[in-house]
Image: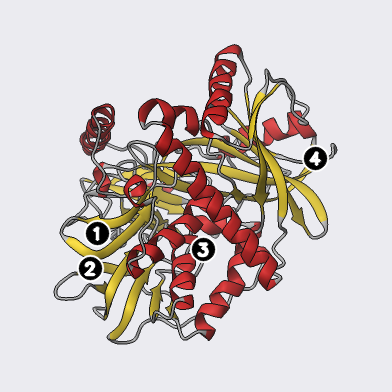
Amino acid sequence: MNRNRIDKMPSVSESYWLKSTELPTFTSLEGNLETDVVIIGGGISGIMTAYQLTKKGYRIILMEAGRLLNGTTGYTTAKLTAQHGLIYDHLLQHNGKDTARRYYEANTEAIQCVKTLIHEKGIDCDFFEEPSYVFAENEEQQKKVLREGKAYEEVGIDGGFVHTIPLEIEHLGAVIMNQQVQFNPVKFLKPLVEEIVAQGGLIVENTRVTDIESNPRPAAVSQEGHKVEGDCLVVCSHYPFYDKEGYYYTRLKPSRSYSIAAETTKDYPGGMYVNAGEPAHSLRSIHVDGKKLVLAGGYGHPVGHKQDTEENYSKLYQFTDRVFGVEQVPYRWSAQDPYTLDQIPYIGKYSTEMDNVFVATGYRKWGMSSGVLAGLLLTDLISGKPSKYEDMFSPLRPITEPNMKQLAETSFHAGKMFARDKAEIPKGQFTDLRPDEGKAMKLNEQRAGAYRDQQSNLHVVDTTCTHMGCETHWNEAERTWDCPCHGSRFSYRGDVLEGPATQPLKKLEEAE
């Protein structure tokens, strides 16, 4: 057993959002099809895009590699807010007042869209309107929070700097944004999925798209070779997998973070919170089986850069226990999200060479509002409706000089990890592995990844990522092989869990 594992916490990750709701199931793609719009990805972005388009009369086919909502959307902290950390001072300094204001307006419109749908359709999804806070823990953070408060004034945001917060934690003030939302995203999206189907939309699951063809009409090509052709195609696969255009692997940096739902001795005071520094501490309430629990998140790190990820859960537990007193943790889960060069999502045309192919990615862990926003904006773009947000979110926007450094660092980082891991010679014997332990080892002069499951069965794979050849690293808490270069993740059996990789890790002969 890992020394960082805590008895009051489950040893296997499970999302309450997915446990709380039984989703409909759909068959896989069995042949070639044609439609108006092909949508790749069954998370909040893909579903909201499909919903908005079917409302306008478009025929859609939504293709999901696994099960609907079993990606990042099903493992979020589900804060639906326009308060994305200390983003507005950053936008004022680097992009100007107009961009900062439009960013706020775009996300506020997304929140209002959700509120309207919940009200009109009577969706029961644990909806609560709450104030959202970013609080300072030291004087350096306080300076940043004060600047953010001034940015709120300049942009015209409903909120500003406050000296105290309801949360009983040491702080030096915070910036508040009023009338934000927390909800259960799976409960919210399920009725929309049902309505998409009722309106004639087609959804296929367990259908991984591995290629895109763009002439004369765009088409998604499945792993089995089936094609779905449309007038337009939308990539909502979280991390874009198609590398022949757009080169998103040079412009995105994926980060993983952790969440626990805890029964506590102290009552939760209301509100949603995140600190202004690192490590991140995110807080909100969550209703589980009639009980009000604390949902804590944070302790993020670049994907594939840490093996002992149980430590992250442990630290999150200790923080929550310090603030609220933990009695039990019935659920824990983790997720990841890519960051763009300038902190603004990429929503729009995939590349200059693919006019009718669109993409939505780079939500920086604020995917609830960004995903809804993507559905609204992509629908406008596909239907030819002008949008005042198009240029701001366009993936084709110029890379400014400050972001050129970030671009170079992202590319250098991938090259550095590739070279370092190729030169590393793993040590250890397969016979040394205990049940529920995994690590990289040497097998027949090559690097191999081995995991011994709880029944003592050994699973061995080639750790070379099938995306661009970097070496994957063991993730202890989730029992996965994670790529430190571009964020692909694989099960211990080698199955693809997260892109951009589309092919599984190669299985190797067991060494016992």
Spatial CA span between label 2 and label 3: 23 Å
Q: Earlier in the sequence, mark 2 or mark 3?
A: 3
Residue annotated with mark 3: 70
Query: In the picture, residue 290 is in which quadrant?
Result: bottom right
Residue closest to the eye, 420 or 320: 320
Q: Earlier in the sequence, mark 4 or mark 3?
A: 3
**Identity of the residue drawn at 60% across and 51% down:** 78
What's the amino acid at mark 4?
Tyr
Crowd class of label 2 (few under 14; some 14 to 19; many from 20; radius 10 Å) = many
Q: Earlier in the sequence, mark 1 or mark 3?
A: 3
Residue annotated with mark 4: 268
Spatial CA span between label 4 and label 2: 48 Å
What's the amino acid at mark 2?
Ile
Spatial CA span between label 1 and label 3: 21 Å
Spatial CA span between label 1 and label 2: 7 Å
Residue closest to the eye, 124 or 54: 54
Q: What element carries label 4?
A: loop
